[in-house]
Amino acid sequence: MFTFACPRCREELEAEDSIRGTRMACPQCGQRISIPRNRAWSSGGDAQGGPPRVLVVVVAVATLFLIAGAFWGRMVVTARRAEARGPECVKCQGTRQVKCATCKGEKTQRCPNDKCDKGQSVNSRGTLEQCFSCNGRGAVRCQTCAGVGAYACPVCVDAGAR
């Protein structure tokens, strides 16, 4: 003899092993039900003879622990790698780029023409005209950083860091 539950009314029913896999009417609600074939899941399982709810909960909790453990392990590995790299570069703070000292990150610098004033310069006749050095902008692309505003950190490059 074994027990199983009706999928409709959840009545606990008892049947003999010889009638496994057949169909019958539930004595409580009259629903036609299949008698489970698998002995391992017959008692305490779901309506279709599936695994017991306790087993499903245990598997779900175990899966959550595995996922949490993998996440924790990844955090530990990342922290250890950061420790192994050592402290960040004091010049660039680990960005591998240093702000240009000439233009201070602005990407341009003052027009090299001493007579230029905000893009206007005095020509040989004494009249104002557009400065040819900066094309009337009053500034030119920074020569130190090539207009990028930063350049590769010399400390990191020399040390071969990161």
Image (cartoon, helix red, strand yellow):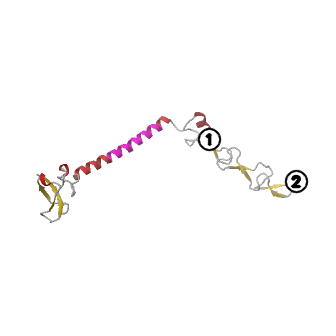
Q: Which residue lies at the image location 58% right of the left edge and 37% below the top edge? A: 156
Residue 147, horizontal then vertical, whole percent: 68, 48
Q: At which x and y percent is residue 90?
A: 56, 38
Q: Secondary structure at mark 1?
A: strand
Q: Give the residue type that dot 1 points to.
A: Ala
**Camera-side residue: 31 or 46?**
31
Q: Amino acid at mark 2?
A: Ser
Return the x and y of residue 57 as percentages of the image width and height.
26, 51
Q: Mark 1 or mark 2, which is nearer to you?
A: 1
User: Do labels 1 and 2 touch, CB within 8 Å?
Assistant: no
Residue 119: give x, y in percent of width and height.
76, 56
Residue located at (60% from left, 36% from top): 157
Q: Label 2 belongs to which residue?
A: 124
**Camera sees residue 9:** no
The residue closer to the viewer here, 99 or 3, is 3
Categorize mark 1 by other alpha carbons within 10 Å: few (<14), some (14-19), many (20+): some
Task: Check disc 2: other Cα within 10 Å, few if <14, some if 14-19, many if 20+.
Answer: few
Is residue 83 visible from the viewing direction of this image? yes
Query: Distance between the Cα atoms at labels 1 and 2?
Result: 42 Å
The residue that disc 1 covers is 152
**Does the magenta-highlighted stretch encompass residue 39?**
no
Judged from the image, the secondary structure of the residue bearing numbered disc 2 is loop
* Residue at the image position 42 percent from the left and 39 percent from the top: 77
**Point 67% across, 49% down: residue:** 107
* The quadrant where residue 94 appears: top right
78 to the left or right of 156 = left
Badge count:
2
Question: Which quarter of the image is occupied by the C terminus?
Answer: top right
Magenta span contains residue 69: yes
Indicate left or right for 130 with 107 as reference: right
Please state the extent of the stretch shown in magenta in the rendering: 64-82
